[in-house]
Amino acid sequence: MKPHTPSPLPVGSVANASSQAQRRKYRDPYALAQARQRKAANLKRQEELKRERAEALGDSVRGITTPFVESFDTAIPPATLGIKSTEGDEGSTKVSEAAAQVPLNHFVTPSEFEKAIEHSYVLTQPLISKNPDLRDPAQEVEELQRHAEAHERATVAVSRILSLANGNQKDRTRFNIQRCIETFGRHNTDKFLTPRAPSNQPRAADKTPLADKTPRAGPDTGSSEVQIAILTAKIRALANHLERPHCQKDKVNKRNLRVLVHRRQKLLAYLRRKERGGERWKNVVETLGLTDGTWKGEISL
């Protein structure tokens, strides 16, 4: 007789049993309800943590809206937002206060605009006959009045054409960059902010003075404050662009926004470390409305 050999156990019995238990588990309505409840609780907790972080750190892209940052949209400085144009008298060659102070496009300066308006008023002035027998005083007054009205309409039309508020985003960004240089450049801020310690102070060990820095040739365009302000202007322009309904799938500009935000974060961390919360840091943060969320921690967009 042959010895009895037991039949081998099926290899897949354990796997089949576990898969069957899982299938029974997912068929159980009570287990499904518990899973959905745990998922809802986790999502709710994530939203609460996100809201708490946003309230504590602020918006990592926009920060807090200030009048200076809000003026990036129209490129009009906050000091001239409330100015209204005034009507001039008959035959007057004055340019309205708003047209003189609102920035102009196409690299036109207010003085050039005023001179051009005065010259055009003289060129278009009606001719008056030198012969007193051929002159009609009533007709001359009427012609001068029509000329003044036409000149006023032309002045308003030209000021609207040259107004930077009616230009494209490229022109506004160019002017905003120049305004950031003039506002935060150290060639201007050194006059009212406490400057850093001079570089010719003697060292503690050898008492030898350090070499003086090369004097600045022109406006300050490379300091951290200026670069942070320029990046803030570009970030606001991109954020406004991506909020439009037809720009939700603009992946190229979404990546550009992430690059600019992280570049600004590095500069803010560097300025914070160097200035140690000094006057320059406070001036940049308060003017641009930058919160802790713009430079502290990880930023994910």
Image: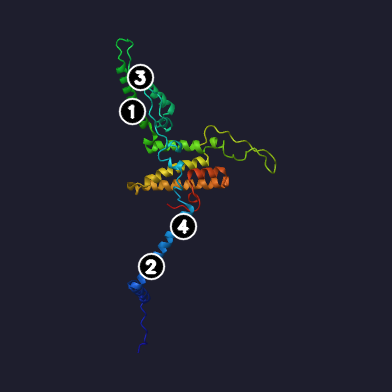
Q: Residue furthest bottom?
A: 1
Of the residues tagged 4 and 3, which is closer to the observer? Answer: 3
Query: In the image, residue 123 lies at what x, y percent?
Result: 35, 19
- Camera-nearest label, 2 or 1: 1
Look at the numbered disc 1 and give the secondary structure of its residue. Answer: helix
Instruction: Name the residue type under label 4.
Output: Glu
Pointer 2 or 4: first along the chain: 2
Q: Which residue is mark 1?
A: 153
Disc 2 target residue: 37
Q: What number of labels is visible?
A: 4
Residue at disc 4, secondary structure: helix
Q: Front-most of 45 and 122? A: 122
Q: Which mark is residue 300?
A: none
The residue closer to the viewer here, 287 or 154, is 154
Amino acid type of disc 3?
Answer: Leu
Q: Earlier in the sequence, mark 1 or mark 3?
A: 3
Label annotation for residue 123: 3
Marks 2 and 4, how far apart at CA? 22 Å
Q: Residues within 10 Å of mark 2 (few under 14, many from 20)?
A: few
Which of the 4 image quadrants contains residue 238? top left
Q: Is residue 167 visible?
A: no
Q: What is the distance, in whole Å, between disc 1 and disc 3 at their CAs? A: 16 Å
The front one of 118 and 174 is 118
- Dot 2 or dot 1, earlier in sequence: 2
Residue 263 percent across, percent down from the top left: 47, 46
